[in-house]
Image (cartoon, rainbow, N blue to C red):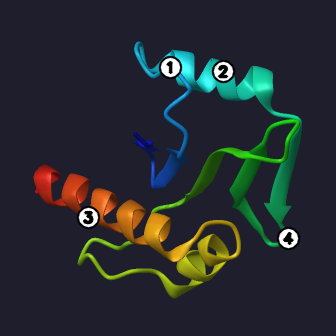
Amino acid sequence: MAEIFADNGLIIYMPSNEIPTNPYWKAFMQVAVLTETMDIVEGEEDFVVFRDEDDDILAIQMPEPVDEYQVPSERIINMLRAVIDEEELTDLLEHVREVKASLV
């Protein structure tokens, strides 16, 4: 199952269920150890794709993809479309919306 962590307007999305997430810092340590390359979008330093040696995505750091009214950010959505498929994107947005709704 994918994991999402949020802090200060940024989220880190970990699509793989192979990374241990309990306690939560294990996931961050695993990404740090396994990251071989990072894709950083020019002008969008908060959008970073962490990849392993096989070029698989370990994690994606990004600004929150939906605003406080649950409206998707086209800027973030377009960057995500370049790296994940539509089904995964839909799941990510639904999860973020659910979490935001539970905090209201």
**SS class of the residue under badge 4?**
loop
- Left or right relative to 8: residue 35: right
Which dot, 4 or 1, sits closer to the camera?
Answer: 1
Question: Residue type at mark 2?
Answer: Gln
Instruction: Mark 2 and mark 1 in contact? Answer it, CB < 8 Å.
Output: yes
Which is nearer the N-term, disc 2 or disc 1? Answer: 1
- Left or right relative to 38: residue 67: left
Q: x, y (%) of residue 13?
A: 52, 48
Query: Can residue 65 be seen by looking at this rendering?
Result: no
Q: Residue at x 69, y 67 (%)?
A: 83
Which residue position holds label 1? 20
Q: x, y (%) of residue 82?
A: 70, 75
Which dot, 3 or 1, sits closer to the camera?
Answer: 1
Specify the quadrant of the image occupied by residue 50: top right
Q: Nearer the viewer, residue 18 or 99?
A: 18
**SS class of the residue under badge 1?**
loop
Distance between mark 4 and mark 1 Cα atoms: 31 Å
Which residue position holds label 3? 97
Q: Is residue 24 above or below residue 68?
A: above
Q: Is residue 5 above or below residue 27?
A: below
Instruction: Mark 3 and mark 1 in contact? Answer it, CB < 8 Å.
Output: no
Which dot, 2 or 4, sits closer to the camera?
Answer: 2
Which dot, 3 or 2, sits closer to the camera?
Answer: 2
Distance between mark 3 and mark 4 Cα atoms: 27 Å
Which residue position holds label 2? 30
Which residue position holds label 4? 42
Which is nearer the N-term, disc 3 or disc 1? Answer: 1
Which is nearer the N-term, disc 2 or disc 4? Answer: 2
Distance between mark 2 and mark 1 Cα atoms: 8 Å
Q: Is residue 6 above or below residue 86?
A: above
